[in-house]
């Protein structure tokens, strides 16, 4: 194993299609990282099977086994420390994290959210975008701060909303973009091109005044 790889841990709760994309781009060498551990809060997550298939260590930290959010998060932090994780990637992790956890990994937690932040924080984003008649929708990768789904945004990708869409077809179109922008942001973090200071994203040492919008040139960084 090369020693300049960034140690990354991926936290999941479900299917893990974003995890799969991160695994693929790590294996192909596009992301200069070592996935040290995949942690799920549910033993049933299909993402665990994806990790096992890729020979990545897995851990289940089931929130229902802990008396409080703090106890649960202390176990998460303990596990992340055992694996010497330098970057925490939330990929469909369905637990809200408190200030305790976020402060422990300040500036080193990324999340992907299926909307164009600041639009539609929270759940059921595709359904809500259809309901309000949006013509464009998308996804965002952001640093996690104490404001749920509202941390500083690194990169976004847009998709059109079609008249014939239902939440499922729209989610599929958005997911295709998630599988590109998340590996890209992780790649940049691992290359030390990306950081977060005082709620601002720094890209190549310059503050971003607005999120990067995915272009074909960016996509070629993963090919
Ligand atoms: C994705 O839509 C992600 O944006 C959201 O949860 C979903 C997870 O999907 N946070 P998957 O488990 O990566 O397939």
Image (spheres, rainbow, N blue to C red):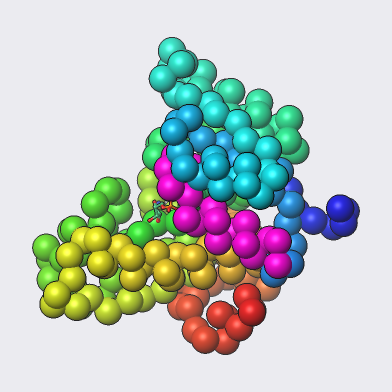
* Residue 113 percent across, percent down from the top left: 39, 56
Q: Main secondary structure of the magenta part?
A: helix
Q: Is residue 10 above or below residue 177?
A: above
Q: Is residue 71 found inside the magenta-colored segment of the image?
A: no
Q: Is residue 125 above or below residue 178?
A: above
- Tally of marks: 0
Q: Position of residue 51 (x, y in %)?
A: 60, 45
Q: Quick one: which residue is furthest to the top in this view?
A: 67
Question: To which quarter of the image does residue 190 belong?
Answer: bottom right
Q: In the picture shown, does residue 85 fall above or below 128? A: above
Q: Residue most toward the bottom?
A: 217
Q: Residue at x 30, y 53 (%)?
A: 121
Which of the image's four quarters has the C terminus? bottom right
Q: Nearer the viewer, residue 152 or 186?
A: 186
In the displayed structure, would residue 85 be above or below residue 59?
A: below
Query: Who is closer to the viewer here, 73 or 38?
Result: 38
Please name the residue shown 18% across and 58% down the image.
Answer: 127
The residue shown at (33%, 70%) is: 173
Locate residue 127 relative to residue 187 in the image: left or right. left
Instruction: Say if the magenta span includes residue 23.
Output: yes
- Residue range corresponding to the magenta coloring: 11-28
Res 193 seen here:
no
Q: Residue at x 54, y 40 (%)?
A: 48
Percent coordinates x, y for residue 35 in the rendering:
69, 49
Quarter assignment of residue 112: bottom left
Say left or right for 190 vs 111. Answer: right
Res 137 visible: yes
In depth, the one of 132 and 195 nearer the eye is: 132
């Amino acid at each position: 194993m090369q020693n300049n790889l960034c140690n990354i841990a991926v936290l999941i709760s479900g299917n893990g299609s974003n995890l799969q994309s991160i695994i693929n781009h790590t294996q192909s060498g596009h992301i200069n990282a070592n996935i040290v551990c995949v942690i799920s809060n549910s033993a049933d997550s299909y993402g665990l099977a994806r990790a096992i298939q890729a020979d990545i260590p897995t851990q289940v930290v089931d929130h229902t086994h802990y008396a409080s959010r703090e106890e649960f998060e202390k176990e998460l932090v303990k596990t992340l420390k055992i694996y010497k994780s330098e970057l925490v990637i939330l990929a469909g992790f369905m637990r809200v994290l408190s200030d305790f956890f976020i402060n422990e990994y300040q500036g080193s937690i990324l999340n992907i959210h299926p909307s164009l932040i600041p639009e539609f924080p929270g759940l059921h984003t595709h359904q809500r975008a259809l309901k309000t008649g949006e013509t464009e929708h998308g996804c965002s990768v952001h640093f996690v701060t104490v404001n749920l789904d509202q941390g500083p945004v690194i990169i976004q990708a847009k998709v059109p909303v079609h008249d014939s869409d239902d939440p499922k077809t729209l989610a599929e179109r958005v997911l295709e973009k998630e599988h590109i922008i998340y590996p890209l942001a992780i790649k940049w973090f691992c290359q030390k091109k990306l950081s977060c200071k005082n709620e601002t994203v720094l890209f190549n040492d310059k503050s971003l005044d607005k999120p990067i919008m995915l272009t074909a040139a960016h996509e070629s960084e993963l090919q």
